[in-house]
């Protein structure tokens, strides 16, 4: 009973963090991690024994990843007016991922005794922008910035996981490997379209009062089965989300009318609301648990702080040139490159024999916190600057009116 009460209180506090994030400009992930860490300190002080929860983290992370990518893809609009934005965000997700991964892998290779492939698999977790942190943090920015962050961070999650799996599950990288990988992509796209039509049909035809839970369970099932065969399963999540989130763009096709589009749109809207609620719940639980598992010595570890600062510096430098190349305003988007759930999940996915000493839990925590704090300060400074500009404009207008 005590655990249930405590959990309810913690989730309600997490909800307050989410509500106030737009006003405080403090990313909720920082507060969630601190809250989880604070709970751990209290349980230690009062000698309260809890079961080992570390094995729960990958499960929550996997479900969280599915829901976050699904939520992000449901938010994305696909039409002709978005082509330029999609190109820029795709470039923003892919180019920094590759450059940062290769750069960090070279540094790890230079300062360690491991082969380059092992160093690359350890570098990739630091290269993925966390949509779980980025999207909620830009709610109050202008629409064009918000859309760019939604596209960029969602695609970064997908590209990052696919890139990591490609490096981790292949022993060589010849023409045969790339050919087989292309075949996997093609296969998962075909599976995605077939599954999307099937799930849309079920969403439209199920008259039972419980209809969304079976759909979510089927999505998770398809994702996990695809992973068993080393298929890029996140592509399925993205295709499904984009397809049902952009049904109006398919009106021109005759076959789509069989799905009773108006009714299906209403069901999709309800489904989207459920996914948003579920994503918040799983994300909050994940970061609370991760914060609970953090040790103070890991946050303040002097052996990794210089590496953490170097990694964050590389991330910002590459992001600077990427935004310049795409002709996108630097502020505040330069600072919106947080690391989070995907970074943790990919780090946990590295086989123990392939983990290098430089990349440990302390380094992961420090990079996540530093990127979140930099994003917070960047958004705060941009907001203050915008408010000053508005006030100055009003003063000028008033002086003109008085004259």
Image: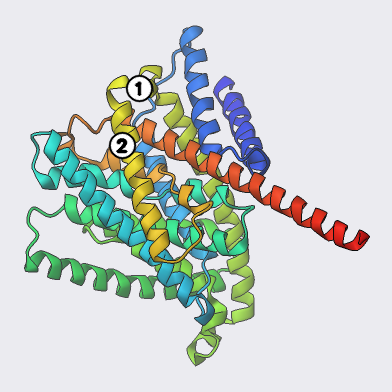
Q: Quadrant of the N terminus?
A: top right
Considering only vertical position in the picture, is 5 above or below 225? Answer: above
**What residue is rendered at 56% in x and 73% in y?**
204
Give the residue pinned by disc 1: 298
**First reached walking from the N terminus: tag 2 or tag 1:** 1
Q: Is residue 227 visible?
A: no
* Picture quadrant of residue 381: top right
**What residue is rendered at 26% in x and 30% in y?**
360
How many marks the image carries: the answer is 2
Task: Give the CA separation, mark 2 to mark 1.
Answer: 18 Å
Pick the front one: 327 or 103? 327
Q: Secondary structure at mark 2?
A: helix
Q: Position of residue 126 (x, y in %)?
A: 32, 43
Q: Position of residue 295 (x, y in %)?
A: 39, 20
Q: Is residue 32 visible?
A: yes
Q: Residue furthest top?
A: 46
Pick the front one: 121 or 303? 303
**What residue is rendered at 44% in x and 13% in y?**
49
Q: Quadrant of the C terminus?
A: bottom right
- Which label number is shown at residue 310? 2
Q: Secondary structure at mark 1?
A: helix
Q: Tag 2: Cα neighbours inside 10 Å, few (<14), some, or many (≥20)?
A: some
């Amino acid at each position: 009973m005590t655990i249930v009460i405590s959990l309810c209180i913690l989730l309600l506090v997490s909800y307050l963090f989410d509500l106030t994030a737009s006003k405080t400009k403090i990313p909720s992930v920082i507060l969630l991690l601190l809250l989880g860490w604070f709970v751990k300190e209290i349980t230690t002080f009062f000698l309260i024994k809890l079961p080992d929860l570390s094995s729960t983290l990958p499960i929550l992370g996997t479900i969280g990843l599915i829901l976050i990518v699904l939520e992000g893809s449901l938010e994305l609009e696909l039409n002709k007016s978005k082509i330029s934005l999609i190109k820029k965000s795709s470039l923003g997700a892919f180019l920094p991922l590759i450059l940062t991964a290769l750069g960090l892998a070279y540094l790890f290779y230079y300062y360690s005794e491991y082969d380059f492939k092992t160093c690359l698999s350890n570098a990739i977790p630091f290269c993925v922008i966390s949509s779980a942190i980025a999207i909620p943090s830009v709610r109050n920015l202008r629409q064009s910035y918000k859309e760019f962050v939604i596209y960029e961070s969602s695609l970064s999650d997908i590209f990052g996981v696919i890139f990591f799996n490609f490096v981790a599950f292949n022993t060589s990288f010849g023409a045969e490997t790339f050919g087989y990988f292309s075949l996997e992509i093609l296969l998962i796209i075909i599976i995605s379209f077939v599954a999307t039509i099937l799930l849309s049909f079920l969403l439209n035809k199920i008259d039972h009062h419980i209809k969304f839970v079976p759909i979510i369970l089927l999505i998770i099932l398809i994702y996990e089965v695809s992973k068993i065969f080393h298929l890029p399963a996140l592509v399925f999540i993205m295709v499904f989300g984009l397809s049902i989130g952009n049904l109006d763009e398919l009106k021109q096709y005759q076959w789509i009318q069989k799905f009773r589009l108006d009714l299906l749109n209403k069901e999709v809207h309800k489904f989207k609301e459920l996914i948003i609620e579920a994503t918040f719940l799983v994300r909050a639980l994940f970061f609370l648990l991760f914060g609970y598992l953090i040790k103070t010595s890991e946050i303040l570890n002097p052996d990794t702080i210089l590496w953490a600062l170097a990694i964050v510096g590389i991330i910002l430098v590459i992001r600077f040139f990427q935004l310049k190349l795409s002709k996108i305003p630097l502020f505040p988007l330069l600072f919106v490159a947080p690391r989070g759930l995907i970074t943790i999940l990919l780090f946990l996915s590295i086989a123990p024999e392939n983990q290098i000493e430089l990349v440990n839990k302390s380094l992961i925590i420090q990079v996540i916190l530093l990127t979140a704090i930099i994003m917070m300060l960047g958004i705060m400074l941009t907001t203050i600057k915008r408010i000053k500009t508005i006030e100055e404009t009003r003063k000028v207008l008033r002086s003109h009116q008085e004259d």
